[in-house]
Amino acid sequence: MRNRFNPGALCVSLAALCAATPALAQSNPSVASENAQGEQIVVTGTRSGEGVAVRDLPASITVISDADLQERQTRIVSDVLRDVPGVAVSRTGAIGGLTQIRIRGTEGNHVLVLIDGIEAADPYNGEYDFGTLIADPAARIEVLRGQQSSLYGSDAIGGVIQYITLTGREAPGVSVRAEGGSFGTYTGSARIAGYSDTFDYAVSGSLYQTDGTRTARYGTRDVGSTNAGASAKLNWAPSEAFKLTGVARYSYTDADTNDSEDDPTSPLFGYTVDSPGVHYRNEAIYALVRGELSLADGRWITAMTGQIADTERKGYNEDGFDYGDKGTRYKGSLESSYRFGSDHIVHRLTGAVDFEREEFRNTTPSAFVFQGKRSTENLGLVGQYELTVDDALQLGASVRYDDNNRFDDVTTWRAQAGYRLPFGLRLRGAFGTGVKNPGYYELYGYSDGEYIGNPNLKPEKSEGWEAGVDQIIAGGLATIGATYFDSRLKDEIYTTYPAPDFIATPSNRATKSRQKGVEVFLSAQPIEQIKFDLAYTYLNSKENDVTEVRRPRHVGSVNATVFSNDKRFAGTLTMRYNGRQTDVAYTDPSYVPVRVSLKEYVLVNFNADYKVTESISVFGRVENLTNEDYEEVFSFATPGRAVYGGLKAKF
């Protein structure tokens, strides 16, 4: 693969981002990941600006800590999301290929993605491509499942994924990492972070470059990619009453891709085939600033927030520029939260106002494509109430009204409750509604002879409930839990192929689809030298009794880590199971899709890390240890066994 990325450009972009004045955000990215009692704290499940202990949030949420990411040697963020209950991952072949995340059987564009509080979805496509996100040197992930539109508006039907880089106070010091391995792959990262009494900072950059592997089932072309990212997070608190947070991020992806055979006379019609010269480039800039005022001894928090996300995607073929799009999202928020009560009963009232403007442009060089700019504006009003009684009862309710200049106004809401018994058993349940507005491409997209958008689409709407139980075992040495969920989706957007031209066109279904299932997890560290996490999901997602595609009925994972007594050695075994699933194939010359079945598979990884000194470590890992032959998307071949190794240092 040719080297299309200039590392110097990454450094220049990072410096520019650090010096720029960023916009503002709606989810507080500066809250610490743990409280004084060592409990995990999350920010995604509330709009208050305060963190909530996971054990006190009556919702289905999973936290992947920085330690988890390090122990599993995570380089591609979507890989570790396979370990979260309710989550299914689909990647079109190699690293850098389009990667979709589905939560509880919803579509990929039904998942709201936040990066350090910034809404990250491509405004043009209305969905975030996880193929463009590589792991930072120090980060954590929060995955909140279930309808969350009452907090965040459109997109949060299946849930919310928030990727959060650690602050300079949480992870100070200088760290560097370099590794290489199979398929001509080399990766690296660097981070510098620190803090003083009133200020903390963290600046980092990561690179993942690979010559890749073949992705055409019957092809030989290696499909490679270059992925790079840089981020900066700054916090300034000149007094206990005021804090200013700034975040900036740059993302770059240049990935080879393969097309489908479009010659009806070919025996491989509809299959992925070698496509020399075909690749895409994706660049994105995100920025955030949050000004927070804390009064009444920290009980009244008011924050002015806003953000910007600017993305550009260009596709190329052998002849040059083939297609492209640009999208920009501006978003500002005002949040105010007041906490009151006693040591035993705590109330929290929160109000928020969100204003968002999205601008879109199709840059495809075609006389048939409208290349002018269109936009959508939305005003959202949020109210939230949270109650905690001792260490037993948790109640919550939220409601949101969205005034949109393109779609009908909508009101969404959610209610949730949890109760913990004295012996550590907690019962919880929730009911909520969600909405997803059509994306620009669905409304106005055009590809000559292949796709025509539909400007008359209506937003998709969802409602659902869940009931769960969690049990803390042996004073916290282990936690086990299970959740049943049941949701219904109305006005689902799907692709039709109307005669006589059979050109793909989106439309709203007249029927409802249903997603129901069970999520189970177990997390334990019975002794200091052993730690393991298990997750399993059973899913039944159907439309008119027909199983929906790329939604395996069974998904599970096991992560087991062992440490030496002196903690200098750590080894992690990861096994990820993906059950049989249905996909669609366009192998019929009439262009009517054919349903196909993709076989189940198990991916086994093994990682090891050894500290040579207190500052320097050597590490290695084997991915797809058993050399499993599998497909996540029809006719897209996937990588075989791979071995990587390298050095890292932290000072």
Image: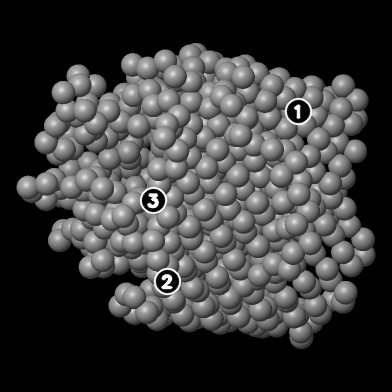
Of residues 173 and 2, the one drawn nearer to the viewer in this rendering: 2
How would you rate the neighbour count of disc 1 (Cα within 10 Å): few for under 14, some for 14-19, many for 20 or more? some
Location of residue 563 in the rendering, given as x and y in whole percent from the top left corner: 75, 26
Label 2: state its secondary structure: strand
Location of residue 12 in the rendering, given as x and y in whole percent from the top left corner: 76, 49
Residue at 11%, 50% (x, y): give it.
498
- Report, in whole angstroms, how far the alpha carbon at label 3 lies from the one at label 2: 20 Å
Q: Give yes or no for contact between labels 1 and 3 (Cβ–Cβ under 8 Å).
A: no
**Residue with the mark numbered 3:** 365
Which label's residue is closer to the chain start, 1 or 2? 1
Q: How is the image coloured?
A: one colour
Residue at 72%, 75% (x, y): give it.
291
- The mark found on residue 597 in the picture is none
Residue at 65%, 51% (x, y): give it.
250
Query: Can residue 511 be seen?
Result: yes
Q: Quadrant of the C terminus?
A: top right
- The mark found on residue 375 in the picture is 2
Total labels drawn:
3
Please indicate whether residue 90 sits to the left or right of residue 240 in the image: left
- Report, in whole angstroms, how far the alpha carbon at label 1 lies from the one at label 3: 40 Å
Which label's residue is closer to the chain start, 1 or 3? 1
Q: Give yes or no for contact between labels 3 and 2 (Cβ–Cβ under 8 Å).
A: no
Disc 2 marks which amino acid? Ser
Which label's residue is closer to the chain start, 3 or 2? 3
- The mark found on residue 178 in the picture is 1
Label 3: state its secondary structure: loop
Location of residue 6 in the rendering, given as x and y in whole percent from the top left corner: 69, 38
- Quadrant of res 430: bottom left
Query: In this picture, is 645 found above or below 436?
Result: above
